[in-house]
Amino acid sequence: MGTILGKPFAGFFHQEEARIVLFGLGGTGKSSIMHKFKTGETLTTTMPTVGLNVESVKYKDSNLCFWEMGGQQCYMWFPLWKHWFQEIAGLVLVVDSTGRDQIEETKDFLNVVIDEIQGSVPDNAPVLVYGNKHEVPGAMSASEISNKLDLTSLRKKNWQRNWHVQSSCAFSGDGLHEGLDWLLKNAERM
Ligand SMILES: Nc1nc2c(ncn2[C@@H]2O[C@H](COP(=O)(O)OP(=O)(O)OP(=O)(O)O)[C@@H](O)[C@H]2O)c(=O)[nH]1
Ligand SMILES: [Mg+2]
């Protein structure tokens, strides 16, 4: 039996890696965040992800497998979402903190994802929100993102999950470890 999250983990005993799904609108920084975790380097040349982008990452004592759901034309893959989100240790929504004009669309997208994966994802799977591109002047704070996504009302809406909004920068790595540490700590409680 493999170990993930640094110890035997009953919920995913048949998996060798803990799967974490990253989702969000196109261009929010999902690939850049994954690359930073994988290599420690800044991703300098970016291309929109088509479909899925999968990366194995050793993080502290944990073997993780990041699954990025490409944000552009993602509805094309709608029939597969339920499968992608199965047997996950946690979810990561990546938001562009500079995109005030996109936050309503992000909220709608989040609600569509939630409705679609309801029942496929363990009720207590934690959800981390990266408020990425935080270093840009005028970027939204974590609490502004939380309010605008109306995360409190999602908690009431049969979505009894643990949420945490973490400001981040995929270039410097600022906030990335703090966010992932929170996610893994809460995944261990599942
Ligand atoms: N300023 C700033 N730009 C960033 C940051 N992270 C990513 N970017 C830039 O945002 C753009 C999109 O980054 P990607 O990592 O490709 O975004 P993505 O979410 O994977 O996009 P899709 O694959 O299309 O869904 C690129 O130009 C990145 O350099 C960040 O923390 N700060
Ligand atoms: Mg991408």
Image (cartoon, grey):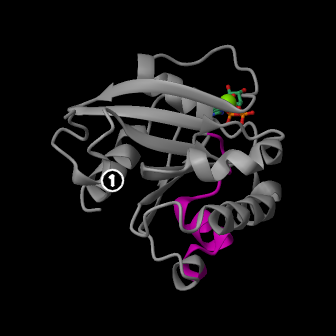
Q: Residue at x 58, y 40 (%)?
A: 135
Query: Which quarter of the picture shows residue 40?
Result: top left
Q: Give percent across and percent down for residue 68.
A: 59, 36
Q: Is residue 146 magenta?
A: yes
User: Is the residue 130 above or below the residue 145 in the image?
Assistant: above
Q: Is residue 81 left or right of residue 156?
A: right
Please state the horizontal and vertical placement of residue 185, each as a whole percent of the image: 26, 54
Element type at marker 1? helix
Q: In the image, is residue 21 part of the stretch drawn in magenta? A: no
Q: Residue at x 15, y 42 (%)?
A: 7
The residue stretch that appears in magenta: 136-153
| Label 1 neighbour load within 10 Å: few <14, some 14-19, many 20+ | some
Q: Position of residue 183 (x, y in %)?
A: 36, 52
Q: Nearer the viewer, residue 75 or 185?
A: 75
The residue lying toward the viewer, choosing from 84 and 22, is 84
What residue is shown with label 1? 182
- Residue 171 shows in the view: no
Q: Give x and y (percent) for residue 128.
A: 47, 55
Q: Is residue 16 left or right of residue 175?
A: left
The quarter of the picture showing ligand 2: top right
- The secondary structure making up most of the magenta span is helix
Say which quadrant the C terminus sits in: bottom left
Q: Is residue 153 visible?
A: yes
In the rendered image, the residue lying farthest to the left is: 7
Q: Is residue 42 above or below residue 82?
A: above
| Residue 14 placement: quadrant | top left
Q: How many marks?
A: 1
